[in-house]
Amino acid sequence: MKTNVIKRVIGTSVIIIDEEEYGPKKKRTKVTVKPSKKGAVKGMAIGGMIGSRLGPQGVVIGSVVGGIAGAVLGEED
């Protein structure tokens, strides 16, 4: 059994990819992302502002999408 650990920095967040090999052509990949609370709050605010141009539904959808993107891509807390 062989394990490869790959660390990648996307934006300012760290994403850890852990691959384990189980015999021929069988791999199990585990992805770990450290979420950012500050990034989520900023992303929600920006997404809400952008979505406000599309109406009430746009605010909600923009906030959710912005919060998720901010949590994944924001600076690590």
Image (cartoon, helix red, strand yellow):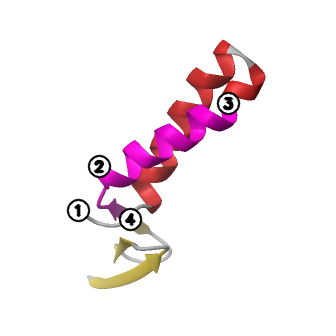
| Crowd band around label 2 with a 10 angstrom C-alpha radius: few (<14), some (14–19), many (20+) | some
* Residue under numbered circle 3: 51
Callout 1–callout 2 Cβ contact below 8 Å: yes
Give 64 or 5, whichever is nearer the viewer.
64
State the residue at coordinates (53%, 32%): 63
Left or right: residue 40 versus residue 43 is left
Q: Quadrant of the C terminus?
A: bottom left
* Residue under numbered circle 1: 77
Give 53 or 23, whichever is nearer the viewer.
53
Instruction: Say which of marks 3 and 1 sits in front.
Output: 3
Expressed as whole percent of the image width and height from the top left, the position of residue 60 reads: 57, 22
Work out whether mark 3 precedes mark 1 in sequence or the reverse, and give the earlier one.
3
* Residue under numbered circle 4: 28
Expressed as whole percent of the image width and height from the top left, the position of residue 70 reads: 46, 52
* Residue under numbered circle 2: 37
The residue range painted magenta reads: 30-51
State the residue at coordinates (76%, 23%): 54
Left or right: residue 59 versus residue 71 is right
Tell me the tag on residue 36.
none
**What secondary structure is the stretch in magenta mostly built from?**
helix
Instruction: Say which of marks 2 and 4 sits in front.
Output: 2
Q: CA distance from mark 1 to mark 2?
A: 7 Å
Circle 2: residue type: Lys
